[in-house]
Image (cartoon, rainbow, N blue to C red):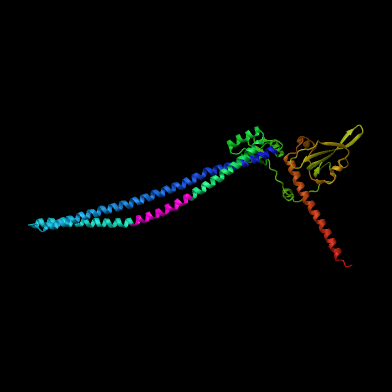
Amino acid sequence: MHADLETLLKLQDVDREILRLNDEVAALPKRVAAIEAKLAGTKAQLETARAAVKADEAAKKKFDAANLDLQQKISKYRDQMLAVKTNEQYKALQHEIEFAQQEIQANEDKVLELMLDSDAKATQVKAAEAELKTEAAEIEKEKKIAHDKTAEDEKLLAEWAGKRNALRASVPEDWLAHYERIAKARKTGISEARDSKCLTCQMTLRPQVFAEVRAGRKLITCESCSRILYYRHVEKTPEEMASLAPKKRVKPKGEAAQAWYYRAEYGGHDEVFLCFMNAETNGEAGVQMNSSRRVYDTHTGRAPVPNETRPGAYKTAFAEDMAGALRLNGFWKEGELDEYGNELPMIVLDALQRDLALAQREATAAARAAAHVENEKAHEKEEVPS
Protein backbone atom coordinates (compact mmCIF):
# COMPACT_ATOMS: atom_id res chain seq x y z
CA MET A 1 0.00 0.00 0.00
CA HIS A 2 1.18 3.51 -0.81
CA ALA A 3 2.76 5.21 2.21
CA ASP A 4 0.48 8.25 1.85
CA LEU A 5 -2.56 5.93 1.81
CA GLU A 6 -1.47 4.34 5.08
CA THR A 7 -1.06 7.82 6.60
CA LEU A 8 -4.48 8.91 5.33
CA LEU A 9 -6.06 5.78 6.83
CA LYS A 10 -4.52 6.64 10.20
CA LEU A 11 -5.67 10.24 9.79
CA GLN A 12 -9.23 9.11 9.08
CA ASP A 13 -9.20 6.94 12.24
CA VAL A 14 -7.96 9.94 14.23
CA ASP A 15 -10.63 12.21 12.71
CA ARG A 16 -13.33 9.68 13.62
CA GLU A 17 -12.14 9.54 17.22
CA ILE A 18 -12.02 13.34 17.42
CA LEU A 19 -15.58 13.49 16.01
CA ARG A 20 -16.75 10.90 18.56
CA LEU A 21 -15.21 12.83 21.45
CA ASN A 22 -16.67 16.14 20.24
CA ASP A 23 -20.12 14.53 19.97
CA GLU A 24 -19.73 13.11 23.49
CA VAL A 25 -18.68 16.48 24.93
CA ALA A 26 -21.65 18.14 23.19
CA ALA A 27 -24.08 15.47 24.44
CA LEU A 28 -23.12 15.73 28.13
CA PRO A 29 -24.74 19.17 28.75
CA LYS A 30 -27.87 17.99 26.94
CA ARG A 31 -28.02 15.00 29.24
CA VAL A 32 -27.74 17.23 32.32
CA ALA A 33 -30.33 19.64 30.86
CA ALA A 34 -32.80 16.77 30.40
CA ILE A 35 -32.40 15.78 34.07
CA GLU A 36 -32.76 19.43 35.16
CA ALA A 37 -35.97 19.69 33.11
CA LYS A 38 -37.30 16.62 34.88
CA LEU A 39 -36.31 18.16 38.22
CA ALA A 40 -38.13 21.39 37.32
CA GLY A 41 -41.25 19.33 36.54
CA THR A 42 -41.06 17.62 39.92
CA LYS A 43 -40.65 21.01 41.64
CA ALA A 44 -43.72 22.32 39.80
CA GLN A 45 -45.75 19.29 40.90
CA LEU A 46 -44.62 19.82 44.50
CA GLU A 47 -45.59 23.50 44.43
CA THR A 48 -48.99 22.61 42.95
CA ALA A 49 -49.58 20.02 45.69
CA ARG A 50 -48.54 22.48 48.41
CA ALA A 51 -50.79 25.18 46.95
CA ALA A 52 -53.72 22.74 46.95
CA VAL A 53 -53.10 21.90 50.63
CA LYS A 54 -53.02 25.63 51.49
CA ALA A 55 -56.21 26.22 49.53
CA ASP A 56 -57.97 23.44 51.51
CA GLU A 57 -56.75 24.92 54.79
CA ALA A 58 -58.05 28.36 53.76
CA ALA A 59 -61.43 26.87 52.75
CA LYS A 60 -61.67 25.01 56.10
CA LYS A 61 -61.02 28.24 58.01
CA LYS A 62 -63.67 29.99 55.91
CA PHE A 63 -66.27 27.32 56.73
CA ASP A 64 -65.28 27.35 60.43
CA ALA A 65 -65.71 31.14 60.52
CA ALA A 66 -69.11 30.87 58.78
CA ASN A 67 -70.27 28.27 61.34
CA LEU A 68 -69.16 30.53 64.18
CA ASP A 69 -71.26 33.35 62.77
CA LEU A 70 -74.22 31.00 62.37
CA GLN A 71 -73.88 29.80 65.99
CA GLN A 72 -73.93 33.42 67.13
CA LYS A 73 -77.09 34.04 65.05
CA ILE A 74 -78.80 31.00 66.58
CA SER A 75 -77.93 32.25 70.07
CA LYS A 76 -79.32 35.68 69.19
CA TYR A 77 -82.55 34.17 67.77
CA ARG A 78 -83.09 32.13 70.93
CA ASP A 79 -82.71 35.22 73.09
CA GLN A 80 -85.29 36.97 70.90
CA MET A 81 -87.69 34.05 71.29
CA LEU A 82 -87.95 34.80 75.03
CA ALA A 83 -89.32 38.27 74.31
CA VAL A 84 -91.79 37.53 71.51
CA LYS A 85 -95.52 38.05 72.14
CA THR A 86 -97.15 36.20 69.23
CA ASN A 87 -96.98 32.69 67.80
CA GLU A 88 -96.15 34.03 64.37
CA GLN A 89 -93.04 35.79 65.68
CA TYR A 90 -91.98 32.64 67.57
CA LYS A 91 -92.41 30.44 64.49
CA ALA A 92 -90.42 32.88 62.34
CA LEU A 93 -87.47 32.80 64.76
CA GLN A 94 -87.73 28.99 64.96
CA HIS A 95 -87.52 28.82 61.17
CA GLU A 96 -84.40 31.03 61.12
CA ILE A 97 -82.75 28.79 63.75
CA GLU A 98 -83.49 25.63 61.71
CA PHE A 99 -82.14 27.24 58.52
CA ALA A 100 -78.91 28.26 60.31
CA GLN A 101 -78.52 24.77 61.73
CA GLN A 102 -78.86 23.30 58.21
CA GLU A 103 -76.14 25.64 56.93
CA ILE A 104 -73.89 24.62 59.83
CA GLN A 105 -74.39 20.94 59.00
CA ALA A 106 -73.60 21.56 55.30
CA ASN A 107 -70.45 23.47 56.23
CA GLU A 108 -69.34 20.71 58.60
CA ASP A 109 -69.81 18.12 55.78
CA LYS A 110 -67.66 20.24 53.51
CA VAL A 111 -64.99 20.58 56.22
CA LEU A 112 -64.97 16.78 56.60
CA GLU A 113 -64.49 16.38 52.84
CA LEU A 114 -61.67 18.91 52.92
CA MET A 115 -59.97 17.07 55.78
CA LEU A 116 -60.09 13.75 53.88
CA ASP A 117 -58.85 15.44 50.70
CA SER A 118 -56.09 17.19 52.65
CA ASP A 119 -54.78 13.85 53.91
CA ALA A 120 -54.42 12.59 50.32
CA LYS A 121 -52.78 15.83 49.22
CA ALA A 122 -50.41 15.76 52.18
CA THR A 123 -49.36 12.26 51.08
CA GLN A 124 -48.75 13.62 47.56
CA VAL A 125 -46.67 16.45 48.99
CA LYS A 126 -44.48 14.02 50.96
CA ALA A 127 -44.00 11.80 47.88
CA ALA A 128 -43.10 14.82 45.72
CA GLU A 129 -40.65 16.04 48.36
CA ALA A 130 -38.98 12.60 48.49
CA GLU A 131 -38.80 12.44 44.68
CA LEU A 132 -37.39 15.95 44.52
CA LYS A 133 -34.71 15.04 47.05
CA THR A 134 -33.74 11.92 45.05
CA GLU A 135 -33.65 13.78 41.74
CA ALA A 136 -31.63 16.63 43.24
CA ALA A 137 -29.02 14.13 44.46
CA GLU A 138 -29.06 12.43 41.04
CA ILE A 139 -28.55 15.64 39.12
CA GLU A 140 -25.62 16.62 41.33
CA LYS A 141 -24.11 13.20 40.66
CA GLU A 142 -24.72 13.56 36.91
CA LYS A 143 -23.22 17.05 36.90
CA LYS A 144 -20.06 15.72 38.51
CA ILE A 145 -19.88 12.81 36.04
CA ALA A 146 -20.42 15.22 33.13
CA HIS A 147 -17.78 17.59 34.48
CA ASP A 148 -15.22 14.82 34.97
CA LYS A 149 -16.02 13.21 31.59
CA THR A 150 -15.78 16.55 29.81
CA ALA A 151 -12.38 17.22 31.38
CA GLU A 152 -11.21 13.73 30.38
CA ASP A 153 -12.53 14.09 26.81
CA GLU A 154 -10.96 17.53 26.41
CA LYS A 155 -7.62 16.09 27.52
CA LEU A 156 -7.99 13.26 24.98
CA LEU A 157 -9.01 15.76 22.30
CA ALA A 158 -5.80 17.67 22.87
CA GLU A 159 -3.79 14.45 22.49
CA TRP A 160 -5.66 13.39 19.33
CA ALA A 161 -5.26 16.89 17.90
CA GLY A 162 -1.51 16.53 18.31
CA LYS A 163 -1.56 13.18 16.51
CA ARG A 164 -3.72 14.67 13.78
CA ASN A 165 -1.34 17.57 13.19
CA ALA A 166 1.61 15.17 12.98
CA LEU A 167 -0.20 12.99 10.42
CA ARG A 168 -1.36 15.96 8.35
CA ALA A 169 2.20 17.24 8.15
CA SER A 170 3.34 13.99 6.48
CA VAL A 171 0.70 13.97 3.70
CA PRO A 172 1.24 15.91 0.44
CA GLU A 173 -0.73 19.17 0.49
CA ASP A 174 -2.81 18.46 -2.61
CA TRP A 175 -3.97 15.05 -1.32
CA LEU A 176 -4.54 16.41 2.18
CA ALA A 177 -6.72 19.18 0.76
CA HIS A 178 -8.67 16.63 -1.32
CA TYR A 179 -9.15 14.31 1.66
CA GLU A 180 -10.34 17.11 3.97
CA ARG A 181 -12.67 18.59 1.35
CA ILE A 182 -14.39 15.23 0.71
CA ALA A 183 -14.43 14.33 4.42
CA LYS A 184 -16.12 17.64 5.23
CA ALA A 185 -18.78 17.08 2.57
CA ARG A 186 -19.28 13.31 2.99
CA LYS A 187 -18.02 12.62 6.56
CA THR A 188 -15.30 10.29 5.22
CA GLY A 189 -12.57 11.06 2.72
CA ILE A 190 -11.17 7.58 2.09
CA SER A 191 -12.88 4.29 1.23
CA GLU A 192 -11.93 0.64 0.84
CA ALA A 193 -12.21 -0.94 -2.60
CA ARG A 194 -13.12 -4.61 -2.80
CA ASP A 195 -14.53 -6.88 -5.49
CA SER A 196 -14.21 -4.04 -8.04
CA LYS A 197 -16.44 -1.75 -5.95
CA CYS A 198 -16.07 1.31 -3.75
CA LEU A 199 -17.48 -0.07 -0.50
CA THR A 200 -18.79 3.32 0.65
CA CYS A 201 -20.84 4.42 -2.37
CA GLN A 202 -21.12 0.88 -3.87
CA MET A 203 -20.19 2.14 -7.33
CA THR A 204 -18.50 -0.45 -9.60
CA LEU A 205 -14.96 0.52 -10.55
CA ARG A 206 -13.52 0.16 -14.02
CA PRO A 207 -11.07 -2.79 -14.28
CA GLN A 208 -8.12 -0.49 -14.93
CA VAL A 209 -9.00 1.66 -11.90
CA PHE A 210 -9.41 -1.34 -9.60
CA ALA A 211 -6.09 -2.77 -10.84
CA GLU A 212 -4.37 0.52 -9.95
CA VAL A 213 -5.98 0.53 -6.51
CA ARG A 214 -4.89 -3.07 -5.90
CA ALA A 215 -1.35 -2.26 -6.96
CA GLY A 216 -1.29 0.51 -4.34
CA ARG A 217 1.52 2.44 -6.01
CA LYS A 218 -0.34 5.74 -6.36
CA LEU A 219 -3.41 7.46 -4.99
CA ILE A 220 -6.65 6.79 -6.89
CA THR A 221 -10.06 8.38 -6.28
CA CYS A 222 -13.53 6.95 -6.83
CA GLU A 223 -15.07 8.35 -10.00
CA SER A 224 -18.48 8.49 -8.27
CA CYS A 225 -17.96 9.80 -4.70
CA SER A 226 -14.40 11.19 -5.09
CA ARG A 227 -13.17 9.38 -1.99
CA ILE A 228 -9.55 8.22 -2.05
CA LEU A 229 -9.53 4.45 -2.58
CA TYR A 230 -7.39 1.81 -0.93
CA TYR A 231 -7.18 -1.97 -1.21
CA ARG A 232 -6.61 -4.08 1.89
CA HIS A 233 -4.92 -7.31 0.89
CA VAL A 234 -6.15 -10.13 3.12
CA GLU A 235 -3.90 -13.15 3.04
CA LYS A 236 -5.82 -16.40 2.60
CA THR A 237 -4.49 -19.67 3.91
CA PRO A 238 -3.81 -22.44 1.38
CA GLU A 239 -6.88 -24.24 2.75
CA GLU A 240 -9.11 -21.17 2.16
CA MET A 241 -7.83 -20.67 -1.36
CA ALA A 242 -8.12 -24.38 -2.13
CA SER A 243 -11.76 -24.33 -1.02
CA LEU A 244 -12.46 -21.98 -3.94
CA ALA A 245 -10.96 -24.44 -6.42
CA PRO A 246 -12.34 -27.80 -7.58
CA LYS A 247 -11.91 -30.50 -4.94
CA LYS A 248 -10.07 -32.75 -7.40
CA ARG A 249 -7.14 -31.02 -9.02
CA VAL A 250 -6.24 -31.87 -12.60
CA LYS A 251 -2.54 -32.73 -12.92
CA PRO A 252 -0.63 -30.40 -15.25
CA LYS A 253 0.52 -32.02 -18.49
CA GLY A 254 4.19 -32.97 -18.45
CA GLU A 255 4.80 -32.02 -22.07
CA ALA A 256 2.95 -28.84 -22.89
CA ALA A 257 3.64 -25.87 -25.11
CA GLN A 258 2.87 -23.58 -22.16
CA ALA A 259 3.63 -24.14 -18.48
CA TRP A 260 3.01 -22.04 -15.35
CA TYR A 261 5.08 -22.27 -12.19
CA TYR A 262 5.17 -20.66 -8.75
CA ARG A 263 8.29 -19.60 -6.87
CA ALA A 264 8.40 -18.07 -3.39
CA GLU A 265 11.42 -16.00 -4.43
CA TYR A 266 12.84 -15.10 -7.79
CA GLY A 267 15.51 -12.60 -8.80
CA GLY A 268 15.09 -10.53 -5.65
CA HIS A 269 11.29 -10.53 -5.90
CA ASP A 270 8.99 -12.32 -3.45
CA GLU A 271 6.36 -14.78 -4.73
CA VAL A 272 6.02 -14.80 -8.50
CA PHE A 273 4.22 -16.77 -11.21
CA LEU A 274 6.42 -17.88 -14.11
CA CYS A 275 4.97 -18.57 -17.56
CA PHE A 276 7.07 -20.51 -20.12
CA MET A 277 6.06 -21.02 -23.77
CA ASN A 278 7.59 -22.91 -26.69
CA ALA A 279 7.23 -21.63 -30.24
CA GLU A 280 8.52 -23.00 -33.56
CA THR A 281 9.73 -20.56 -36.22
CA ASN A 282 10.67 -21.18 -39.84
CA GLY A 283 13.94 -19.62 -40.96
CA GLU A 284 16.77 -20.09 -43.39
CA ALA A 285 18.12 -22.88 -41.19
CA GLY A 286 14.71 -24.56 -41.17
CA VAL A 287 12.37 -25.05 -38.27
CA GLN A 288 13.83 -23.62 -35.07
CA MET A 289 12.53 -23.94 -31.49
CA ASN A 290 12.47 -20.82 -29.30
CA SER A 291 11.01 -20.34 -25.83
CA SER A 292 9.92 -17.33 -23.76
CA ARG A 293 9.56 -16.56 -20.08
CA ARG A 294 7.13 -14.12 -18.44
CA VAL A 295 7.20 -13.18 -14.74
CA TYR A 296 4.22 -11.83 -12.72
CA ASP A 297 3.87 -10.79 -9.09
CA THR A 298 1.65 -13.34 -7.31
CA HIS A 299 -0.46 -10.71 -5.53
CA THR A 300 -0.70 -7.78 -7.93
CA GLY A 301 -0.27 -9.58 -11.26
CA ARG A 302 2.29 -6.97 -12.36
CA ALA A 303 5.45 -7.93 -14.26
CA PRO A 304 8.54 -7.00 -12.21
CA VAL A 305 10.98 -7.86 -15.03
CA PRO A 306 10.73 -7.76 -18.85
CA ASN A 307 9.84 -10.84 -20.89
CA GLU A 308 12.77 -12.87 -22.19
CA THR A 309 13.20 -15.18 -25.20
CA ARG A 310 15.88 -17.84 -25.61
CA PRO A 311 16.67 -20.46 -28.23
CA GLY A 312 15.57 -24.02 -27.47
CA ALA A 313 12.69 -25.52 -25.51
CA TYR A 314 11.91 -23.85 -22.17
CA LYS A 315 12.78 -26.97 -20.15
CA THR A 316 16.42 -26.61 -21.18
CA ALA A 317 16.59 -22.89 -21.92
CA PHE A 318 15.14 -21.89 -18.53
CA ALA A 319 16.07 -24.97 -16.49
CA GLU A 320 17.55 -22.85 -13.68
CA ASP A 321 14.27 -20.87 -13.32
CA MET A 322 12.27 -24.07 -12.84
CA ALA A 323 14.52 -25.42 -10.12
CA GLY A 324 12.51 -25.64 -6.89
CA ALA A 325 9.39 -24.21 -8.59
CA LEU A 326 5.87 -25.61 -8.13
CA ARG A 327 4.08 -26.57 -11.36
CA LEU A 328 0.58 -25.11 -11.83
CA ASN A 329 -2.37 -25.52 -14.18
CA GLY A 330 -3.03 -22.71 -16.59
CA PHE A 331 -3.20 -21.88 -20.29
CA TRP A 332 -3.84 -18.58 -22.03
CA LYS A 333 -3.08 -17.86 -25.65
CA GLU A 334 0.05 -15.87 -26.35
CA GLY A 335 -2.04 -13.19 -28.03
CA GLU A 336 -4.16 -12.81 -24.87
CA LEU A 337 -1.07 -12.48 -22.69
CA ASP A 338 0.30 -9.86 -25.09
CA GLU A 339 -2.94 -7.91 -24.75
CA TYR A 340 -2.69 -8.03 -20.96
CA GLY A 341 0.69 -6.34 -21.20
CA ASN A 342 2.59 -5.98 -17.93
CA GLU A 343 -0.34 -6.88 -15.67
CA LEU A 344 -2.55 -9.96 -15.47
CA PRO A 345 -6.30 -9.33 -15.12
CA MET A 346 -8.08 -10.41 -11.95
CA ILE A 347 -9.74 -13.43 -13.55
CA VAL A 348 -6.35 -14.90 -14.55
CA LEU A 349 -4.67 -13.97 -11.28
CA ASP A 350 -7.46 -15.50 -9.18
CA ALA A 351 -7.40 -18.73 -11.21
CA LEU A 352 -3.65 -19.12 -10.68
CA GLN A 353 -3.94 -18.33 -6.97
CA ARG A 354 -6.68 -20.95 -6.50
CA ASP A 355 -4.65 -23.63 -8.27
CA LEU A 356 -1.57 -22.62 -6.25
CA ALA A 357 -3.49 -23.12 -3.02
CA LEU A 358 -4.67 -26.55 -4.16
CA ALA A 359 -1.15 -27.54 -5.28
CA GLN A 360 0.28 -26.44 -1.93
CA ARG A 361 -2.36 -28.48 -0.13
CA GLU A 362 -1.46 -31.53 -2.21
CA ALA A 363 2.25 -31.01 -1.55
CA THR A 364 1.62 -30.74 2.19
CA ALA A 365 -0.49 -33.91 2.17
CA ALA A 366 2.20 -35.78 0.20
CA ALA A 367 4.89 -34.65 2.62
CA ARG A 368 2.82 -35.80 5.58
CA ALA A 369 2.18 -39.19 3.93
CA ALA A 370 5.88 -39.64 3.22
CA ALA A 371 6.75 -38.73 6.79
CA HIS A 372 4.16 -41.21 8.05
CA VAL A 373 5.68 -44.01 5.92
CA GLU A 374 9.16 -43.20 7.24
CA ASN A 375 7.89 -43.28 10.81
CA GLU A 376 6.23 -46.65 10.22
CA LYS A 377 9.43 -48.08 8.81
CA ALA A 378 11.45 -46.78 11.73
CA HIS A 379 8.91 -48.25 14.16
CA GLU A 380 9.09 -51.68 12.45
CA LYS A 381 12.90 -51.69 12.74
CA GLU A 382 12.66 -50.96 16.45
CA GLU A 383 10.29 -53.93 16.94
CA VAL A 384 12.57 -56.48 15.13
CA PRO A 385 14.39 -58.50 17.85
CA SER A 386 18.18 -58.38 17.70
Question: Is 215 drawn above or below residue 142 in the view shown?
Answer: above
User: What residue do we see at 91% from left, 34% from top?
Assistant: 286
Q: Is residue 36 left or right of residue 272?
A: left
Toward the right, the furthest residue is 285
Name of the residue lying farthest toward the left: 85
Q: Is residue 139 magenta?
A: yes
Total marks drawn? 0
353 lies left or right of 65? right
Say whether residue 223 is visible: no
Q: Is residue 130 visible?
A: yes
Quadrant of the frame with the C terminus: bottom right
Q: Residue at x 16, y 57 (%)?
A: 75
The magenta stretch is 119-140
Say which residue appears at 40% left-offset and 53% top-offset: 129
Q: Position of residue 204 (x, y in %)?
A: 65, 38
User: In the rendered image of this protein, does residue 338 appear above or below residue 92?
Assistant: above
Residue 310 image position (x, y, % from top left): 87, 37
Q: Is residue 374 magenta?
A: no
Q: Could you tell me residue 341's position as x and y percent?
A: 77, 35
Q: Nearer the viewer, residue 119 or 189?
A: 119
Q: Is residue 241 left or right of residue 188?
A: right
* Front-most of residues 266 and 202: 266
